[in-house]
Image (cartoon, grey):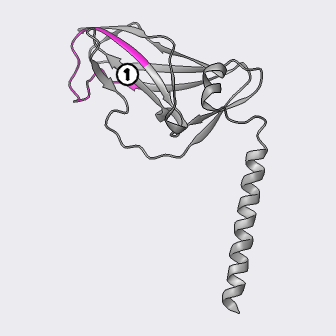
Amino acid sequence: MMQLGRERILNGALALVLAVAVFVVSGCSAPSVTSPDIRRSFSAQLEASQFVTLGDSLALTFRVKNSRSEWVGLPLAINGDLAFDPIVRDSLGREVWRRLAGQLIAGAVEIVGVPANGEKVFAATWNLRDENQHLVPPGNYFINGRLLLENGDTLVAQNIALVTISQK
């Protein structure tokens, strides 16, 4: 008899949690976009300083713009700024550094709201080191970036930043 009472309480609690979850999800003013809609709804630009000195670090900004006239949820594969994966290549096109290279990242899908005709900004910093943590030599580097979305999809910046690194 006691066991049956516990099952009813657990089932009731589970039903309450599901009802709240359905309410929260259905309470959104617009759904998250599906993969084909992402390219129609969003555009992305990468921003970085054009010149930097060895020993400094480089701030990278990834701006995602919503072209719709309504709020849209952007389904990130991992939480927050970690979803932004900048990729640095040298003047010969070889990958020098990628923020998430070789990393095992656990995370839950996060729906980030982007306001109507608004934008969401993601940030990362490159310490001017390669993937082996050696300082890169002075020269020109090309940086692009992508945003990791659910289901293995990505949103790639529409531009490539050229950065010149000089000696101190």
x, y percent for residue 56: 32, 18
Residue at the spot 68% in from the left edge and 91% down from the top edge: 2
Seen in the picture, residue 4 relative to 80 is either above or below; the reply is below
Residue 40 located left or right of residue 162: right
Residue at the spot 49% in from the left edge and 46% down from the top edge: 107
Q: Which segment is the magenta one? A: 125-144
Q: Is residue 136 magenta?
A: yes
Majority SS type along the magenta span: loop
Residue 168's quadrant in the figure?
top left
Residue at the spot 57% in from the left edge and 24% down from the top edge: 121
x, y percent for residue 149: 53, 34
Residue 65 in sight from this viewpoint: no
Q: Is residue 55 magenta?
A: no
What's under tag 1, amino acid-wise? Ile
Residue 139 in sight from this viewpoint: yes
Which image quadrant: the N terminus?
bottom right
Residue 57 located left or right of residue 139: right
The residue wearing badge 1 is 87
Residues 14 and 62: in front is 14
Q: Is mark 1 on a helix, strand or loop?
A: strand
The residue positioned farthest toward the bottom in the image shown: 1
x, y percent for residue 137: 21, 13
